[in-house]
Image (cartoon, helix red, strand yellow):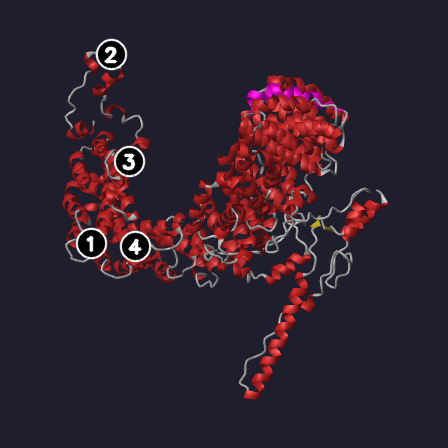
């Protein structure tokens, strides 16, 4: 590095201070911050006449002094800063070779003082990771002088939602313009200001403003031109401080620009790609998809050749991350333009001898294409494999490893097809296993390991054994990448059905696996941990369950909790899949002792880890079944001891475990133990922590479900239910989720043992649950309410429910309507429908709406059983469909929809045509709620009557002179067309009368026009 370059770098790295030190004397004359402080306003107070004059003089002096300071700042020369280097005269002398001189201004040059200097073009060569806008410190002083709030005083911009510092940098011209008449400016400036306003409204405006501005901008894209648009948008999008919403809106705007201008954006491809490419590696998945969409549209607009010309220089970049980004970009381009178009280019760069980095990038492009299109790469295998074959023996290690890694990626995407194309790669990969070490070896292990599942049985057994020998040899490595490759490959090999069990045992890979991979260090690394558990499960497929269990069992009592948890997960997966039939009694005893140790010595701070232990313990006990009977007392004792722990999390986990293992107690015929647990759980219902209370209720529900006789419970079931009634008022979601199903189970098993009055009280408590926020609570409340109604009969429940329809609170009326529908479903509709029809006679809109909603819910719940009541309900629906109230007609349309969905193809077409005649005039309603229900009811009637009848109603309005009429009819026709595409073909009108205009072709008898018998069609044709 030369002395001049070193000096330039040092000059760039010097951080300017507030007192001006660190800048060149000629380049920065910014005064210290203290000298530009604003005038502080003193507190207002009443003064005498003399004091007032003195104060006015003081304020006048201070304001004059402030104006002098601002005038002094405005005279400071502005110097651009590029990559942190101020372009002063001395710095330019260092950076530029000898021979350059300062060119004087032309004599007729007159600078525009009212427009700030634009330094954005200096950033054309800036890195894509840096901001595209860099301003000098003096410009920030001007920004301090221009208030951000002044943008709201500009005409048409008063409704902006925000205006940031970034916006000030780009749209400052709008602020400095103020209320200047735009018509007095030149045409180019008028276009620029108009474009700026529209883009700013799209980025920061309210939703209605944004929508209208985007539409106006789209219509004027070609008049603005790409120069003006990209000059504004690219710096905004490339700045790292832009928020996600602003970036999303600008991407949406750029999509329209590229679509409209097409080849007009070709000169700006490089600048656009410098902004689009970083989006592909963003943390947010939505942003990555947006970046992919932008690059795809740009590639279609400018073509493959232009994209290659733009990206070619970065293919030999020294930074591997940039080359990787280029490969991702080429993959998106190939996916959008077609992989077959990019294959010749890939063949050339993968064969290149100019630079190894070009070959490396070419193979990465193939890998990224495979990741993007997955199995769709199959048709192009014969084009990609030769590219890999040339480079898998390359002299450069990086090229060889990426080629082997790409083989693995393609083989996984093509599984189980394509081995005929991969066959020529087997020998080079096998040779690479013996000639590579360390991280490079891991890629060859994964490459050959991915091909083994594609081979025939004979070749698969041979190469699997070769791989197992290499993996056993490398099992002791400390490189995580090699370990990951060994675990993934071992899992693939063991899951192949045709692999001989003897070759697995002969290779002794199981010993190497448990010796080197079953360790505390692996347990700490979550990624390796999961791979190790999966490999252990796959190994059990070949060597058997007993060997795996005996190898893992000692680790259940290890000091490391993460290690114990990994062992428990592996045992859970193995025993849950294969059962415990192959385990002897001694192994079962050791297993249960290990499970108890793991359960009792866990740390409950990590919620997710405690769930793993809980589920593992419960699943293994369930699989052991009757074999765990001799150990149940010790297990239950440990659980009860933890149930009295002072830590709420310990109590919660103990209760959860009881709810999971009560079924094991039932299998082992431990009824007395179940009853004892029920007593203990009942005594614990005074728990103050809602999470623990919810778990206790879940455990009590399991006890009630599995106890042989409900009468043997102590205390009695009626006493338990009386205790649950006040718990229903608890608004904690977990408590509600557990209490409501528990009451439903009691209603099923002990309905006759509970008093009528108690059930009524509970039913009204449940009515409040019907408006719960969580859907699972509402569903369980619906089910339980129906069970209670079935127990006590509909008559007693209906009276208070119908009274609730008269209340003013809408939510309670809706919940009541749902409850009535549930009662009708549980107790048969004929017990409820007469009362509802009688209640409809009450001249109260709220009551009538509630009755209609109840009928709608009823027919929704009972489904096809509602067809028996169509004729009974028809007069009520006819009255509702002809009511003046919009809401009446809306809810009645919903009832017709439910009837049609539940009763189609059952011979009630006459009633449905009657409903259709009354619903059809409502298609012109403007209320969105009403029109949605009307359209849905017509779609349901299309199902019940067939599309032909609905089309007969539709033809007459499709070409009506009035636009609003046509819109309504076309909306219905489009829905019919989408849902009944093939069914409507026979119902199209015949146009033979128009055929003579087409020529002298004679019509046979089958083609001659006939009278269709539909007057409307005759008029229309």
Q: Which residue is at 32% across, 57% downward?
A: 766
| Mark 1 vs mark 2, CA separation in Å | 65 Å
Q: Position of residue 233 (x, y in %)?
A: 56, 45
Q: Report whether 99 appears left or right of 578.
A: right
Query: What separation in Å lies between label 2 and label 4 (alpha carbons)?
Result: 70 Å
Q: Quadrant of residue 308?
A: top right
Single out the residue that lies furthest toward the front. 107
The disc, 3 or 4, on the residue closer to the chain's N-terminal end is 4
**Residue 992 position (above or below residue 713):** above
Residue 85 appears left or right of 965: right
Whole-number angstrom distance, CA of label 3 to CA of label 4 = 37 Å
Residue indicated by mark 4: 815
The percent position of residue 202, horizontal first and vertical second, equals 48, 48
The verdict on residue 382 being magenta is yes
Q: Which residue is mark 3?
A: 970
Q: Is residue 253 visible?
A: yes
Q: In the image, which is nearer the foreground, mark 3 or mark 4?
A: 3
Mark before the other along the chain sequence, 1 or 3: 1
Q: Nearer the viewer, residue 311 or 915?
A: 311
Task: Say what secondary structure mark 1 lies in.
Answer: helix
Tell me residue 560's x, y (percent): 67, 49
Based on the picture, tell me whether residue 559 belongs to the magenta stretch. no
Query: Looking at the image, is mark 2 or mark 3 earlier in the sequence?
Result: 3
Instruction: Name the quadrant of the C terminus.
Output: top left
Q: Earlier in the sequence, mark 1 or mark 2?
A: 1
Q: Which residue is mark 2?
A: 1000
The answer to whether the residues at label 2 and label 3 have Cβ atoms under 8 Å apart is: no
Inter-mark Cα distance, 2 to 3 = 35 Å
Tally of numbered tags: 4
């Amino acid at each position: 590095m030369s002395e001049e370059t070193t000096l330039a770098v040092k000059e760039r790295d010097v951080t300017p201070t507030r007192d001006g030190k660190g800048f060149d004397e000629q380049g920065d004359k910014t005064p210290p911050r203290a000298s530009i402080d604003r005038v502080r306003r003193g507190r207002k107070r009443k003064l005498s006449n003399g004091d007032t004059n003195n104060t006015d003089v003081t304020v006048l002096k201070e304001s004059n002094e402030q104006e002098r300071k601002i005038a002094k700042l405005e005279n400071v020369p502005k110097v651009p800063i590029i990559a942190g280097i101020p372009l002063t005269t001395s710095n330019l002398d260092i950076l530029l070779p000898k021979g350059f001189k300062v060119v004087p201004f032309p004599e007729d040059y007159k600078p525009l003082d009212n427009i700030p200097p634009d330094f954005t073009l200096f950033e054309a060569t800036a890195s894509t990771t840096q901001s595209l806008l860099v301003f000098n410190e003096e410009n920030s002083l001007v920004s301090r002088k221009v208030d951000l709030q002044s943008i709201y005083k500009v005409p048409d911009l008063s409704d902006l939602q925000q205006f940031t510092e970034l916006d000030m940098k780009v749209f400052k011209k709008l602020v400095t313009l103020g209320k200047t008449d735009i018509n007095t400016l030149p045409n180019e400036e008028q276009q620029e200001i108009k474009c700026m306003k529209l883009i700013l409204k799209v980025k920061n405006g309210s939703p209605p403003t944004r929508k209208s501005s985007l539409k106006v901008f789209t219509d004027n894209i070609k008049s603005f031109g790409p120069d003006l648009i990209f000059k504004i948008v690219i710096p905004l999008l490339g700045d790292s401080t832009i928020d996600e919403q602003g970036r999303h809106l600008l991407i949406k705007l750029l999509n329209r620009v590229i679509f409209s201008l097409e080849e007009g954006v070709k000169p700006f491809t490089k600048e656009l790609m410098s902004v689009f490419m970083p989006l592909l590696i963003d943390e947010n998945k939505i942003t990555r998809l947006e970046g992919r969409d932008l690059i795809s549209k740009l590639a279609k607009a400018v073509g493959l050749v232009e994209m290659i010309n733009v990206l070619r220089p970065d293919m030999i970049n020294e930074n591997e991350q940039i080359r990787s980004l280029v490969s991702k970009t080429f993959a998106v381009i190939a996916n959008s333009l077609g992989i077959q178009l990019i294959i010749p280019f890939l063949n050339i760069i993968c064969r290149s001898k100019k630079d190894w980095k070009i070959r490396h990038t070419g193979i990465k492009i193939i890998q990224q294409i495979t990741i993007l299109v997955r199995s769709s790469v199959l048709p192009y295998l014969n084009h990609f494999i030769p590219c890999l074959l040339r480079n898998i023996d390359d002299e450069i290690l990086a090229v060889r490893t990426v080629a082997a890694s790409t083989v693995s990626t393609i083989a996984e995407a093509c599984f189980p097809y394509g081995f005929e194309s991969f066959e020529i790669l087997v020998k080079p990969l096998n040779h690479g296993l013996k000639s590579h070490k360390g991280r490079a070896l891991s890629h060859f292990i994964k490459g050959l390991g991915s091909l083994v599942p594609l081979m025939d049985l004979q070749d698969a057994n041979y190469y699997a054994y070769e791989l197992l020998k290499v993996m056993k040899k490398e099992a002791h490595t400390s490189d995580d990448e090699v370990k990951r490759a060994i675990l993934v490959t071992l899992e693939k090999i063991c899951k192949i059905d045709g692999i001989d069990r003897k070759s697995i045992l002969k290779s002794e890979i199981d010993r190497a696996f448990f010796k080197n991979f079953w360790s505390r260090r692996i347990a700490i690394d979550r990624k390796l941990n999961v791979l190790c558990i999966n490999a252990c499960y796959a190994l059990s497929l070949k060597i058997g369950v007993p060997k795996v269990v005996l190898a893992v069992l000692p680790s259940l009592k290890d000091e490391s909790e993460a290690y114990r948890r990994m062992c428990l997960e592996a045992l859970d997966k193995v025993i849950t899949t294969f059962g415990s039939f192959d385990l002897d009694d001694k192994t079962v005893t050791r297993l249960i002792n290990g499970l108890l140790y793991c359960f009792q010595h866990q740390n409950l701070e990590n919620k997710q880890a405690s769930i793993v232990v809980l589920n593992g313990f419960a699943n293994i006990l369930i699989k052991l079944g009757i074999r765990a009977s001799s150990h149940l007392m010790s297990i239950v004792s440990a659980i009860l001891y933890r149930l009295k722990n002072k830590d709420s999390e310990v109590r919660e986990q103990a209760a959860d475990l009881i709810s999971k293992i009560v079924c094991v107690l039932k299998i082992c015929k431990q009824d007395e133990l179940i009853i004892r647990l029920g007593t203990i759980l009942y005594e614990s219902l005074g728990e103050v922590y809602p999470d623990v209370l919810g778990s206790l209720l879940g455990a009590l529900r399991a006890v009630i479900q599995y106890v042989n006789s409900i009468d043997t419970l102590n205390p009695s079931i009626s006493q338990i239910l009386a205790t649950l009634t006040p718990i229903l008022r608890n608004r904690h979601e977990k408590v509600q989720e557990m209490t409501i199903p528990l009451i439903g189970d009691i209603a099923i098993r002990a309905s006759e043992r509970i008093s009528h009055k108690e059930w009524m009280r509970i039913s009204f408590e449940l009515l409040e649950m019907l408006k719960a926020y969580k859907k699972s609570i509402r569903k369980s409340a619906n089910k339980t309410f129906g069970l209670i109604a079935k127990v006590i009969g509909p008559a007693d429940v209906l009276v208070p429910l119908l009274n609730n329809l008269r209340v003013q609170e809408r939510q309670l009326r809706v919940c009541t309507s749902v409850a009535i529908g549930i009662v009708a479903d549980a107790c048969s509709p004929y017990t409820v429908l007469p009362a509802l029809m009688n209640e409809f006679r009450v001249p109260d809109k709220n009551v009538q709406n509630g009755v209609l909603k109840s009928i709608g819910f009823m027919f929704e719940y009972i489904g096809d059983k509602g067809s028996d009541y169509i004729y009974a309900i028809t007069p009520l629906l006819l009255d509702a469909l002809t009511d003046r109230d919009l809401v009446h007609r809306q809810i009645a349309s919903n009832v017709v929809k439910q009837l049609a969905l539940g009763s189609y193809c059952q011979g009630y077409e006459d009633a449905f045509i009657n409903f259709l005649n009354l619903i059809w005039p409502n298609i012109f309603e403007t209320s969105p709620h009403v029109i949605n229900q009307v359209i849905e009811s017509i779609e349901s009637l299309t199902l019940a009557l067939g599309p032909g009848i609905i089309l007969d109603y539709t033809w007459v309005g499709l070409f009506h002179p009035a636009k609003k009429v046509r819109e309504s009819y076309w909306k219905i026709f489009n829905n019919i067309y989408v849902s009944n595409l093939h069914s409507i073909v026979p119902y199209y009108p015949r146009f033979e009368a128009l055929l003579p205009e087409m020529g002298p072709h004679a019509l046979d008898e089958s083609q001659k026009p006939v009278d269709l018998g539909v007057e409307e069609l005759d008029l229309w044709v």
